[in-house]
Amino acid sequence: MKELWGNLKFAWKYTKDQKANLIKYVIATIVSIGINLVLPILSARIITELTTNLSIQLVVIALIIFIVENLFNITRYFTDIYMQRVYRETFTKIQTELGSCILKLENKVLDENGTGVFIQRLTNDTSRLADIFNVLNIYLSNFITNVGIFIAVFLINKVVFLYLVVSISIMFWIERTRTKKTIAIDKVYRKKSEKVTGFVGEIVRGARDIKMLNSESSFINALNKKILDTNKTRYEFTEVRANYVLLGGFASDTSYFLLIVLLFMLMINDYLSIPMALVVYNYSTRLDGFIYWFGQLIEKVKDFNLSASRVFEIINGKKFKKESFGTMHLDKVNGDFEFKNVAFAYGKNKVLNDVSFKINANETVAFVGKSGSGKTTIFNLLCKMYDIDKGEILIDGINIKKLDRESIRGNITIISQNPYIFNLSIKENLKLVKEDLTNKEMIEACKVACLHDFIMSLPKKYDTLIGEGGVNLSGGQKQRLAIARALVQKTEIILFDEATSALDNETQESIQKAIENMKNEYTILIIAHRLSTIINCDRILLLDSGKIVAEGTHQKLLKKSKIYKNLYESEIKE
């Protein structure tokens, strides 16, 4: 009960703005409960009239039942409307906050958990949370309604009442045991289902590569194994439920058989009249509903608690750690930054070891080195995608740990090697980074990125949908769109992480000219696979085994660094 109360308080903060609709819903539900309590009594009165004397009173009672039942239908209509309003607003708020929290998670957390973990919680679990007050009202009101049956039986005959209490207690125990076991299995099932969802997402996103690798059968076999394992758990859930439903059915049938025997004994001993025995039997046959609603209420509560704990883990829990930022705010940075003795590792894999360097505002600097030397990691740390293990990173002389999120990411744009393009139109993709983007700004950015002419050749031009992950664009077109998206932001620091790797020579030359035009106005950092693209940089930093081993201009490095010279000569040979 303590867990339920805590989780209800957690869910209530998303519902409290809907107090008016919730109050209307509760009032309509109370009216429905009252009607449900009256109907069995009226039904019993009809049975009594039918078995004793036929009179006009029978028609009057039937008319009253007709009116009451229609009143019940009207209240049900309004409860549905009010609850849909509450559910819609609550579901939206919970999903929005959970989505926001997922975006605030540390990248290490996202790396360690599959997408299925978050998709299942963002869809299924939030729905259960939003629906809890409706669920509790439905099941609790039906449970309370059936309590009226006990009261009526108690007033008619105390012996039958005691018998029903014992019978119901046995069936309650069966329902409670069933719920406890099925919830435990359901917890395991949800975790396995998360893995299946995540794997399906991987198949969809990597469909092209899977086809190119001719690995369809391998992936389908792997998916089949995961689904079979998940369904095995689901079958276990269904089997346990079926076993207890069978046991509950046997207990219920036995109970009714013994009830008839009891009623017979009471009638032949003149402790109960035939009309009253019929009324009691009519009431008792409805007690199956009493057991059902009780079992469902317990199951829904436990199901809600499980969903709440899974959502709570992300929103407020310690298991999914969120990014932390400082409180100091900079509206606009100059573009100076410095690494001081920085060390960093992905788990046990050490990437940077005591790295120190300084970049001046409006300087164009390139980072070169073999794959895995730590180039991209430097960019990730500068954007605070990960927290460093040791040392300091300074922006305009201020420790990055002291700055708020907007001061860091609002002033730095990163153009990655494999930019993610969203399943929106070209215009919408650009507006994601600047909502008030004008057509003039958009066209200028695309012209600089050498993309405007291609866009204008499309049937719907800037309103063209480009598919999930930019599937309808070539690698070079995706990178140019990412460059345009970065130019739209107009940040002081621009990071190019292999951003021209998928461009043809002619387009790359155009982009190089665009970068040249941006020099001395922005702090530009470039990671380049092809050294020929960065020979005009103000400085080049050479990384090897997680350390800066040399720096200088292209010409200076050719003279003083054997590693750099070998890299350059290898490229020329290629």
Image (cartoon, rainbow, N blue to C red):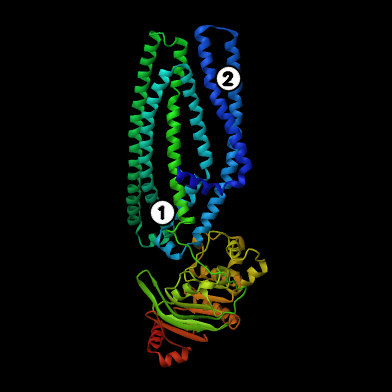
The residue positioned 40% from the left and 62% from the top of the image is 112
Q: Which residue is at a point 38% across and 18% down the rendered structure image?
A: 259
SS type, badge 1: helix
Which residue does the image show at 53% across and 72% down from the upper left?
402
- Examine the image and state in which quarter residue 313 appears: bottom left
517 sits to left or right of 394:
right
Up the image or down, 48 lies above or below 503; here it is above
Label 1–label 2 contact, CB within 8 A: no
In the image, is 239 to the left or to the right of 83? left
Q: Quadrant of residue 388?
A: bottom left
Mark 1 — residue? Answer: 200
Q: Residue furthest front?
A: 158
Q: CA distance from mark 1 to mark 2?
A: 54 Å
What is the x, y in percent for residue 556? 46, 92
Q: Residues within 10 Å of mark 2 (few under 14, many from 20)?
A: some
Whole-percent x, y for residue 263 in the image:
39, 14
Q: How many marks can you see? A: 2
- 204 horizontally vs 71: left or right: left
Establish if 173 lies above or below 319. above
Give the x, y percent position of residue 277.
Answer: 44, 13
Q: As rendered, which of 369 and 205 lies closer to the eye?
A: 369
Q: Which corner quadrant holds the C terminus?
A: bottom left
